[in-house]
Image: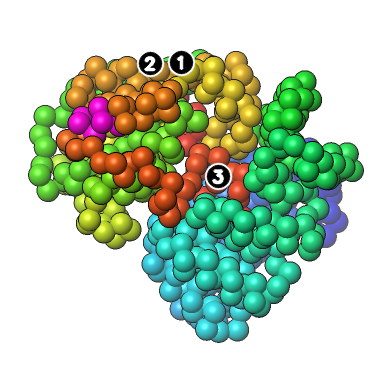
Amino acid sequence: MDDKIKRATECLTNGETARGRRLLEQVLSTDPANVRALWLLSGLQEARGDVDDWFATLKKLRDLLPDELAVLDEQARAFAKVKRLPDSLMAYREFLQKNPGSSSARYNYAHYLVRSGDFREAIVQYEMLLGGDVEKPEEVHLNLSNLLSEHLNEYQRSKDHLEKALKLNPKYTAAWFNLGNLNEQMGELLEARKCFERVTEIGDEEGGALARIADLTRFDGDDEAEILLAMEKKLHLNENPNPDLMFSLGRAYEQKGKHKESLYMYESANSIDRHFLPPYNQESMAAFIDKIQKEYSDNPSSVSADLDLGQVFICGNFRSGSTLLEQMLAGHSNFSAGGERGYFRKIARDSRVKFPTAEALDQDLRLELADQYNRETLNLFGQEARVTDKRPDNLILIGLIKQVLPAAKFIITQRDRLDVAWSIFTTRFGPELPYATSMENILHFIGLQEKIAEHWSNIYEADVTFVSYEDLVDDPKKELTRLLKALGEEWEEGCLNFRELKNFVTTASSAQVRRPLNSKSLGRSQPYHEYMNEKA
């Protein structure tokens, strides 16, 4: 029996999957409870996409090993992979009822709670871990910090947890790195730099912290030669160069006027990323946009006053000025910066919604979704101001958002397409923007964005306002006054004093370049482009 399992393993390793499967089935026909064979078979079934068989095999393993956490973790991962997060959570709840002292199970349970959006319960579970005998409490503090800053806008509490993690482990580079991110996004640039420098002192093997130091540096003199030399040396010595570092070095070269070297760095970094990102299919994406335009061609007629909290969405192309605009509006007494919220991207994947098919939402479901969004807004930001929701890629979801929030207003930022294209090409976005690694694909997607933006403007008319980045920079008062009038607000001088605000600023690239370093950081939801490619 062991010999057949060994041969099956060798077959699977060598790509002889059919033969490997036959050997495993032979083992299981004689010994249906052979755990090693079932485990190998489950991996093969996942790789082949045999979902039903995969789940059946994992169930057999759970029945055989009900107290084995590794099997539970695999089953929970399988549920999550097919968008059955409630089943993942239920599996951990049942396990913890029998094994309440399992810190690993509770840790992973909290992870899936975050993925499902149950942030408050996740905090409860993490705090239970901290009150017990968890092996590495600094990792729990790190995950709590991520949760609080990314999902609940509680930045000081987030910072407190990072400081607690560093008190427990002063050489915890992930906490130093994330503290640098947090300080930068809170406007504390000197403190941010100190944190990244601390990472380089402890150990910055891939150069991620060095890249962040470079991003905080203006290369307009001779004093930065040491940083340039360190980046060049790091790239030269690393067998697998870090694209983050390459993008940062490209920006440094660009500021120094070394345009040939700069272009080489950008092209090389994007070339590396293209090997690891999902492909961008121009034809399927164009067909997807066409389908959205055909499906969402009517303006919802009914508006419930209960749903109207003055919702304002800022969207458009990435790198087209949405962050600047949101910060300017936040200087107005009637607005608060909400940052890049993922609510409607998550709703677009809800099987009940059937996006991008614009079937009329059931009235109860529409009210439920609107109530959830509004309650989330009030819980995070209070009732004092209109909260801007700044996700550039919400541009594709405007029709869906209008179904849920008929009174919502939309601001679409615009900028010279070549400037936008170059800014995207020279920024590392990661899997959320698979088109960003090729200038040809970037320009193609920009064209689709312009097309869908015009479509929304024709349908929703006064509820859609375009803002020019160039006009916003050249004459901000004039452009903002026009925008505020469209939103039913009066001009306030505070809009020009936005730099005095202590807002937490996120950008489209921040979640990628400034990512947490620990492997068990909170799982992000499926990148939106994956959802779009699935549907296209």
As measured in the structure, the alpha-carbon distance from the residue carrying label 3 to the one carrying label 2 is: 27 Å
- The residue under the point 44% across, 39% down is 323
The disc label shown at residue 510, or none: 3
Mark before the other along the chain sequence, 1 or 3: 1
Q: Amino acid at mark 3?
A: Ser
Membership of 504 in magenta stretch: no
Q: Are marks 2 and 1 in contact (CB under 8 Å)?
A: yes
In the displayed structure, 228 sits above or below 122; it is above
> What residue is drawn where x is 26% and y is 31%?
481
Say above or below: 508 vs 481: below
Q: Which residue is mark 1?
A: 447
| Residue at x-position 30% and y-position 57% | 381
Nearest the camera: 368 or 313? 313
Left or right? Give the position of 326 relative to 178.
left
Label 3 or label 2, whichever lies nearer to me, is: 3
Q: Identify the amino acid type marked 1.
A: Gly
Judged by its main secondary structure, the magenta piece is helix
Q: Residue at x 53, y 78 (%)?
A: 129
277 to the left or right of 202 = left
Range shown magenta: 480-486
The residue at which mark 2 appears reads as 451
Distance in Å between CA atoms under marks 1 and 3: 24 Å
Q: Quadrant of residue 178?
A: bottom right
Quadrant containing the C terminus is: top left
In the picture, the disc for residue 262 is none
Foreground of the two, 368 or 317: 317
Q: Which residue type carries mark 2?
A: Lys
